Image (cartoon, rainbow, N blue to C red):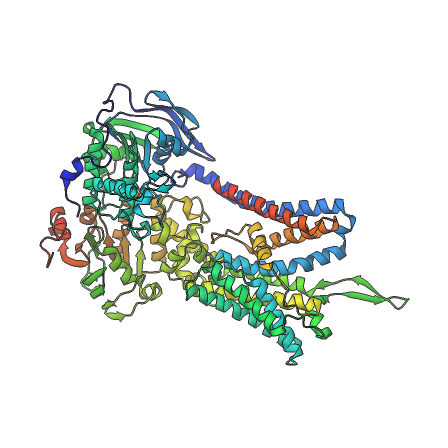
């Protein structure tokens, strides 16, 4: 569905003006001495940054390094506390994102900014609808949207309401929206974080087109491996300061990572210490739900990390949610430690010792207005309450503190609302919640999406330790290096079917992609 | 996103200010209450008397009792528009139980409260089982309960209920009366009215429940993020239903108290009281988005409304102007709350 590299090379719909000034001497954008203070927080301190026409300039840094703030200053969301911003050689100060947009600066947000009840086409042209008199020109709207989507090679119906789309599809719509602005400067904040390998590849093709047309692109991503594909220069930020700017060709990923964290990181994945034992902890047989997945069978062993690999929409998340009772199962059986289970509700699954860590942390994993401690104990309040249902404040605090310490959760206090913590720390809180519940099986759905390198390593280490304690772990991931680096076996999904289970030590990216793409499976 | 870029040092500072902010907000509500009291005592000498304090306490009782229910419902992410009608239905049921069935007053009132609970249960089931939005579900109940109250009474007030029916609304604890030399009774201390005691006791109990119990924690979790709560094993539907039942029971109790004070059951009592209840919760810092709110805030909010009404009355401000003022107060307090959250 995502082939057709030839199509993407032809700018259709809204051709980029080929006569635009080619890369000149003056940079498209030059920032000098940019500082930004929020009450009590210095987010940026004297950062210099410039972007040439036709260049992809990556900005790297851990969560909290100031990347997002810098982007928001360029995009007109925040005004800098100090410093100068020159755009096309003229000093500018954008008062709002609209002003920046009018000047030709478009931003693709990491947190998606789409209106769920409107259609894809309506979202792409929101606020800029093509008109015929008073009325929206529905025909032009649809055609324009289709053209943007085609450019991305995205198989999404422009008339579909956004609320029915997956995270990855929404991300593509967000990118199509930015493309439709015909911007001269594009800011991309983690554009590939929920895309599959193939979708990411078509995005890179579009980026190369844009480069050729003289568009400058600021690119933020935690996936350093993908930079080789498109990035020209890299700027590293740490703690709100500028650390270095280099041509990508003149540096290495290891160097970049070392600069980001301020120390050398020897490895991206921890040494696996756990060894799967023979006994099966979770056994699934013939799991089926029409339209989502069919006849999925697997056995998860104690201490094992089993990967779920596949393309977007292959049914991996759906299977995990059904095992957890979050969505119904039409047929098939589940057994934990040999005991048959009937799971109709997440409460049944939790009682049986199954935990599910959802992909969308904020929407499904955390009570964001509640503090750290309340989130940690939410799934097992009974353990810190009396028989009458009164919470023992001392035991509650001690339990929460224990998991904060054990998982290295960085929070100023147990009472801090979780929405104020970074993505990595939020993920650790969700893990802590299930550790406190003594789960025997933990289903991780893309646990490292959108979190930084250091926090990723911490999450991987925790997963390894969980497995070492005899917990069976399922890791759903769209990043093949992660699958290869962390799992014992890989279950490859294609269109709702579990096509093949591979031994991780004896497979590689090509083989997994082969099965995930539908070749060599039992059927196409 | 300031969340992502909170380095440890700054975070340590913001912890203090977070706590301070909570304090400031609590004291802001309290402070405005004190300011109101001070202002009204200056403008009208009778304001700061024991008798007036007592009548404010009584006036505030119904707002606060309904406000407690509203707070729990709103914290769990819902809204209850039916309480004004439900209190009327509960009150007339209690009165009819006494008058038509000859039930003892305490039993009749329990029946009234029970009717309130049943209305709440229906609200809860309509929201959780039929999946109707709370606004619509309770709007329907608002009309149904009012209609029932008018129907069963023939739209007439139920009176001649006997002195014992008035005990709950008019009685007081520790009332000291001396019969003077002239034979007229002299009130030494008016006592603490039963409704005020009820309000204080229930406010403490529900506050304790919300703060310390598992079910209270679940109420906050459901309002903060229902899906996350469900995926954490919280019985979301049961929690939501329970909040409406509590709101209905409190409305039933409020109905009994109000009718008892008048010793007459009015099927038209309590019109628009649901808005006072919601307003008191909102003034007290409860977020209509769910997940945030406290009983102490709501009680303060109820007093702000009650004292504003009473004080404006004593200063001869018309009822129309009072509505305008209270409307402005609601806008102002919620705006301040937004400012605080926006940062």
In the rendered structure, the answer to whether residue A475 lies left or right of residue B224 reads: left
Depth check, front residue: A88 or A510: A88
- Could you tell me residue B102's position as x and y percent? 66, 81
Q: Which quadrant of the figure has residue A191?
A: top left
Residue at 25% over, 42% down? A143
Q: Say if residue B96 shows up in the picture.
A: yes
In the rendered structure, the answer to whether residue A453 lies left or right of residue A394 reads: left
Q: The C terminus of chain A is located in which quarter? A: bottom left
- Could you tell me residue B54's position as x and y percent? 72, 58
Q: Which quadrant of the figure has residue B168?
A: bottom right
Q: Is residue B175 above or below residue A166?
A: below
- Could you tell me residue A409's position as x and y percent? 37, 47
- Count every numbered label the image shows and give the total: 0
Q: Say if residue A440 shows up in the picture.
A: no
Q: Which residue is at the far top? A: A25
Q: Which residue is at the far right? A: B182
Q: Which residue is at the far front? A: A133
Q: Is residue A437 above or below residue A425?
A: below
In the rendered structure, the answer to whether residue B66 lies left or right of residue A89 reads: right
Q: Which residue is at the far bottom? A: B102
In the rendered structure, the answer to whether residue B299 lies left or right of residue A479 reads: right
Residue at 41% over, 48% down? A418
- Could you tell me residue A59's position as x and y percent? 29, 32
Q: Is residue A277 above or below residue B17?
A: below
Q: Is residue A104 above or below residue B266?
A: above
């Amino acid at each position: 569905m995502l082939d057709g590299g030839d199509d993407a090379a032809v700018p259709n719909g809204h051709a980029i003006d080929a006569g635009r000034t080619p890369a000149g001497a003056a940079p498209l954008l030059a920032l000098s001495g940019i500082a930004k203070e929020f009450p009590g927080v210095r987010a940026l301190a004297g950062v210099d940054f410039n972007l040439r026409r036709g260049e992809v300039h990556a900005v790297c840094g851990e969560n909290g390094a100031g990347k997002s703030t810098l982007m928001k200053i360029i995009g007109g969301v925040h005004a800098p506390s100090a410093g100068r911003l020159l755009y096309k050689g003229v000093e500018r100060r954008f008062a709002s994102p609209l002003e920046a947009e009018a000047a030709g600066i478009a931003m693709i947000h990491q947190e998606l900014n789409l209106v769920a009840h409107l259609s894809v086409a309506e979202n792409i042209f929101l606020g800029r609808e093509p008109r015929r008199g008073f009325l929206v020109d529905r025909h032009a709207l649809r055609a324009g949207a289709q053209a943007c989507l085609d450019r991305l090679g995205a198989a999404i119906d422009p008339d579909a309401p956004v609320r029915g789309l997956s995270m990855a599809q929404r991300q593509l719509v967000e990118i199509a929206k930015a493309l439709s602005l015909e911007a001269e400067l594009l800011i991309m904040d983690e554009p590939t974080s929920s895309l599959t390998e193939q979708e990411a590849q078509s995005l890179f093709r579009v980026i190369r087109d844009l480069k050729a047309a003289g568009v400058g692109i600021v690119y933020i991503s935690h996936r350093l491996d993908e930079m080789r594909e498109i990035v020209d220069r890299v700027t590293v930020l740490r703690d709100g300061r500028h650390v270095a700017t280099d041509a990508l060709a003149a540096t290495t990923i290891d160097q970049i990572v070392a600069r980001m964290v301020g120390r050398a990181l020897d490895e991206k994945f921890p040494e696996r210490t756990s060894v799967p034992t023979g006994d099966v902890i979770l056994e699934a047989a013939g799991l089926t739900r029409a339209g989502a997945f069919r006849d999925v069978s697997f056995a998860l062993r104690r201490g094992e990390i089993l990967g779920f690999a596949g393309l977007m929409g292959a049914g991996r998340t759906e299977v995990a949610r059904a095992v957890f009772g979050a969505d119904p199962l039409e047929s098939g059986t589940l057994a934990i430690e040999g005991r048959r289970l009937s799971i109709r509700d997440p409460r049944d699954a939790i009682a049986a010792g199954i935990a599910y860590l959802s992909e969308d942390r904020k929407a499904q994993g955390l009570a964001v207005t509640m503090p750290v401690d309340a989130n940690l104990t939410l799934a097992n309040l009974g353990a810190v309450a009396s028989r009458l249902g009164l919470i023992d404040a001392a035991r509650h605090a001690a339990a929460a503190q224990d998991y904060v310490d054990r998982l290295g959760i960085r929070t100023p206090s147990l009472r801090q609302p979780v929405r104020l913590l970074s993505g990595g720390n939020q993920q650790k809180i969700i893990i802590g919640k299930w550790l406190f519940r003594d789960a025997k099986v933990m289903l991780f759905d893309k646990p490292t999406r959108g979190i930084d390198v250091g926090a990723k390593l911490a999450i991987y280490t925790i997963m390894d330790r969980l497995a070492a304690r005899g917990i069976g772990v399922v890791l759903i991931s769209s990043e093949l290096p992660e699958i290869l680096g962390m799992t014992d076996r890989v279950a490859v999904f294609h269109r709702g079917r579990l096509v093949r289970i591979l031994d991780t030590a004896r497979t590689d990216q090509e083989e997994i992609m082969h099965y995930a793409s539908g070749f060599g499976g039992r059927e196409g | 996103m300031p969340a992502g870029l909170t380095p440890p040092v700054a975070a340590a500072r913001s912890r203090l200010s977070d706590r301070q902010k909570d304090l400031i907000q609590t004291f802001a509500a309290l402070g405005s209450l004190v300011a109101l009291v001070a202002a009204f005592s200056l403008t009208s000498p009778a304001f700061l008397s024991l008798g007036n304090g007592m009548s404010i306490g009584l006036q505030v009782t119904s707002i606060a009792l309904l406000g407690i229910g509203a707070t729990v419902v709103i914290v769990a992410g819902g809204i209850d528009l039916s309480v004004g009608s439900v209190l009327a239905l509960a009150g007339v049921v209690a009165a009819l139980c006494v008058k038509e069935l000859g039930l003892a007053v305490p039993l009749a009132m329990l029946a009234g409260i029970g009717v309130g609970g049943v209305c709440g249960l229906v609200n809860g089931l309509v929201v959780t089982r039929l999946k109707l939005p709370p606004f619509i579900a309770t709007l329907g109940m608002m009309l149904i309960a009012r209609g029932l109250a008018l129907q069963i009474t023939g739209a007439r007030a139920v009176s001649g209920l006997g002195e014992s029916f008035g005990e709950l609304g008019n009685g007081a604890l520790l009332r000291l009366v001396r019969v003077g030399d002239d034979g007229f009774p002299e009130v030494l201390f008016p006592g603490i009215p039963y409704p005020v005691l009820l309000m204080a006791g229930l406010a403490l109990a529900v506050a304790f429940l919300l703060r310390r119990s598992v079910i209270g924690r679940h109420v906050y979790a459901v309002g903060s993020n229902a899906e996350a709560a469900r995926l954490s094993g919280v019985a979301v539907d049961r929690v939501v239903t329970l909040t409406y039942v509590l709101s209905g029971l409190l409305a039933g109790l409020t109905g009994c108290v109000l009718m008892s004070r008048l010793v007459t059951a009015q099927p038209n009592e309590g019109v628009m009281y649901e808005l006072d209840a919601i307003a008191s919760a909102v003034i007290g810092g409860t977020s209509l988005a769910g997940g945030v709110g406290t009983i102490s805030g709501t009680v303060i909010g109820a007093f702000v409304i009650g004292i504003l009404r009473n004080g404006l009355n004593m200063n001869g401000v018309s009822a129309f102007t009072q509505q305008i003022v209270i409307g402005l107060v609601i806008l102002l307090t919620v705006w301040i709350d937004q400012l605080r959250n926006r940062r």
